[in-house]
Image (cartoon, grey):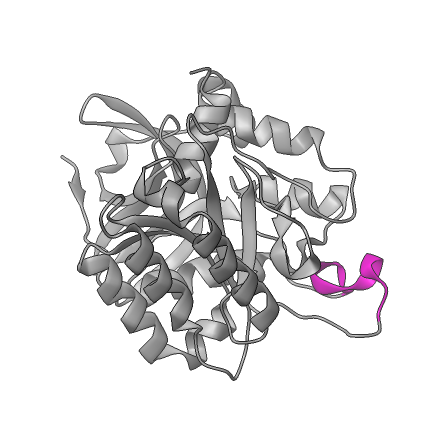
Amino acid sequence: MLFVISCLGQPGIKNYKQFYGMLRDQNKDLLVLRKFEQEGRTQYLVTDPQELDTRILSAAAEAVKPLTWAQAMDTFKETPYVKAIEAAQMKEIPLQDAGIIHGFPKEKGITLTIDLCPSHKPLDRIIFTSLIKEFQKTEKPVPLALSITGRWMLTHNDDLDWLKNLVKSGDISITWVNHSYNHRVSPTAPLKVNFLLEPGTDMNFEVMGTELAMLQHGIMPSVFFRFPGLVSDPKLISKVLSYGLIPVGSDAWLAKGQTASSGSIVLIHGNGNEPIGVNDFIKLLQTEQKSVKDKQWMMYDLRESVEDEFGGK
């Protein structure tokens, strides 16, 4: 017997760990990514490898077939999830911007990713209110991906509740992307020893600690990961992939002068630290205003963009 646990905040989570396996629910084979104990039950964080959504299921041990990571990759090798993992492995050479950086939507539009790095400043709520205003008649909820850090969650409860209420009201939908817990950064260190490449970084905490914090704050971890600063190396990419996470980069970091084209994965920061990027995005919305009204310029769900790109549609 399986049942879904609603993501309203998960108290009393214990023994949260990596665990790969397969279970069947509603005539679908699902990939198990995590296992934990809660209120006397064994719970599993699972993904549908076709659609890349995630949810929590409770299941009897005999309903779950344990797999190694290699077995999981082979079992689901024809799915968009595994194909995206394999594509990320092939693109692991650059020091910056490894992973998926562009989608292939059927119509003109972009996938918007908003990074919430640690900051003492409040959330740039104008990003979200502007999106809702522009798309309220053509696309509701507006799909977004938010790359969130553990430290941002610690100090922005009101902002997080505000975002969750926008989801609850049906104004936006959010794919929550793991952006590491601490997001350490040095203004002087070279990239090869900066961000998550800083010596002594505990990647298990940076990945798993963030997921646990998400669950404790009532939000659902996704299968996506964004490297702080978009900085990585092959060893770090392999490490993130071993957690079953798909790295997501960007081909349009607006504050750095990169322009968005159809299919772009756009990056802006919503943590109050990047007003240039926010202003550029507002201008982009205004430029495309007529196309939005004519349904010729859309916002795309990150999960659907990756599914379309690697699903052979």
Q: In the figure, 125 relative to 58: above or below?
A: below
Q: In the figure, 113 relative to 46: above or below?
A: below
Q: In the figure, 254 relative to 311: above or below?
A: below
Classify residue 23 as left or right of residue 233: left
**Viewer can see residue 299:** no
- Give the magenta range: 189-199
Seen at 28% across and 48% down, the residue is 43
- The foreground one among 130 and 147 is 130
Q: Quadrant of the image for the N terminus?
A: top left
Query: How many numbered marks does the figure carry?
Result: 0
Classify residue 206 as left or right of residue 126: right
Q: Quadrant of the image for the C terminus?
A: top left
Seen at 51% across and 19% down, the residue is 74
**Viewer can see residue 189:** yes
Residue 280 position, x and y percent, is 56, 61
Magenta stretch: includes residue 247: no
Residue 219 position, x and y percent, is 32, 59
- The foreground one among 19 and 30 is 30
Magenta stretch: includes residue 190: yes
Seen at 59% across and 40% down, the residue is 241
- The foreground one among 152 and 144 is 144
- Residue extending furthest toward the bottom: 120
Residue 311 position, x and y percent, is 44, 20
Q: Residue 286: which quarter of the image? A: bottom left
- Residue extending furthest toward the front: 290
Residue 78 position, x and y percent, is 47, 16
